[in-house]
Image (cartoon, rainbow, N blue to C red):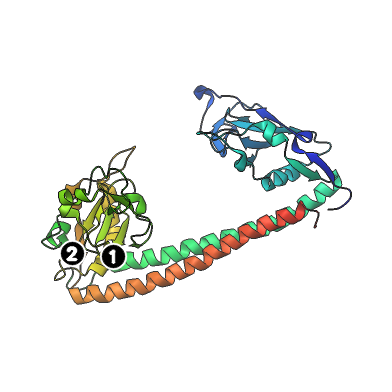
Amino acid sequence: MKAEWDAKVLGDIIRLEYGKPLDKAHRKQDGLYPAYGANGEKDRTDKFLSDQPSIIVGRKGSAGEITLTEDKFWPLDVTYFVEFDRNQYDLQFLFYLLTTLELPSLAKGVKPGINRNEVYALPVLVPGLPEQHRIVAILDEAFDGIATAKANAEKNLQNARALFESHLQAVFSQRGEGWEEKMLQDVVDSDCSLSYGIVQPGHEYLDGLPVIRPTDLVTKIIEIDGLKRIDPSLANSYRRTKLRGGDLLLCVRGSTGVVSVASPELAGANVTRGIVPINFDPALVSQDFGYFLMKSEVLQSQIREKTYGAALMQINIRDIRLLTLPLPPLKEQEALAKTFELLMNKTQHLESIYKQKLTALDKLKKSLLHQAFSGQF
């Protein structure tokens, strides 16, 4: 650390002033000024509480999150806003400084909140104003480059996903000879009832029956590890949704339309009320093809059209049974499924690369901040 940096506590540099409530009558979408909540702009208003740019610090909820403000703004009552001596400290420098302090780690309580006295007690090292300006200039330039790189990586990530989706859309919208349409209920096998799963899973059992919930449907293949286990006796009442392994799992409550596949080791497991297991008649529909078909826009648009509810989105089982499936001949289904699988794997590989780039850029940003505030610039 350079000698000209002074050791202080944060309370020597800033004051955290309380935000104030803003009546609904003064909130408007096209207001002149932003009204900031704990994690960013919450609303707009024609009123302002402060007429100088500052830093918002989340006080409740997203406690410790920080946001740079516009010149005039209204800080809501779940926030603090920063006051400081502008002749001694640079606003952008203070913003970068606060970023390094990980203020969210100070949050406590059921509805997380931070105490400003604990914030004031944090030790910091601060140089004079000219050095602050120099550091800000270096970080601004570096972060502009990082922001551009992140935007490019995020765009490439979106493009990779869009490539797969567009290929699916093209196949199902440009159907060849021999395609026909059938309702879902007419192409499942005789033992597939297209039913909801267990309504009340009950308490956890250490060696109980594995049960899949809508929140588990985050990957293509659902494995047994990490699943909730419930009273095994419930399985007898829900034989119609007993899994065989390889079943398609369609979410019908919450994130309706999400589709996963039960791994082979889940034979004998079950699902909760928010999932409908699907097993196709192998003489009519390839199970592998069915997975991609259920994920296609052709099916997803039908599911969205029939989904209802505000607090909890869901779709009726009758509407699920009546979904219309465009189907090519079985051999073509199998060939398409292989093509889709290859393209999906390539897409996931590209996504992995771009996600790694985004992670590396975030690490670079943290590293630069660490260097800046340990006097290494």
> Residues at badges 1 and 2 in contact (C-beta under 8 Å)?
no
* x and y, in percent, of residue 294 in the image: 27, 60
- Which residue appears at 16% of the width and 63% of the height? 181
Which residue appears farthest toward the front when viewing the image?
207
Nearer to us: label 1 or label 2: 1
| Amino acid, disc 1 | Glu
Q: Quadrant of residue 117?
A: top right
Amino acid beneath label 2? Phe
Q: Residue at label 1?
A: 265
The answer to whether 155 appears left or right of 92 in the picture is left
Q: Name the foreground residue: 207 vs 102.
A: 207
Q: Quadrant of residue 124?
A: top right
Q: Is residue 299 above or below residue 72?
A: below
> Any mark on residue 36, and which?
none
Q: Which residue is mark 2?
A: 280
Locate residue 357 relative to residue 175 in the image: left or right. right
Where residue 369 sits: x, y (%)?
Answer: 71, 53
Number of numbered discs on residues = 2
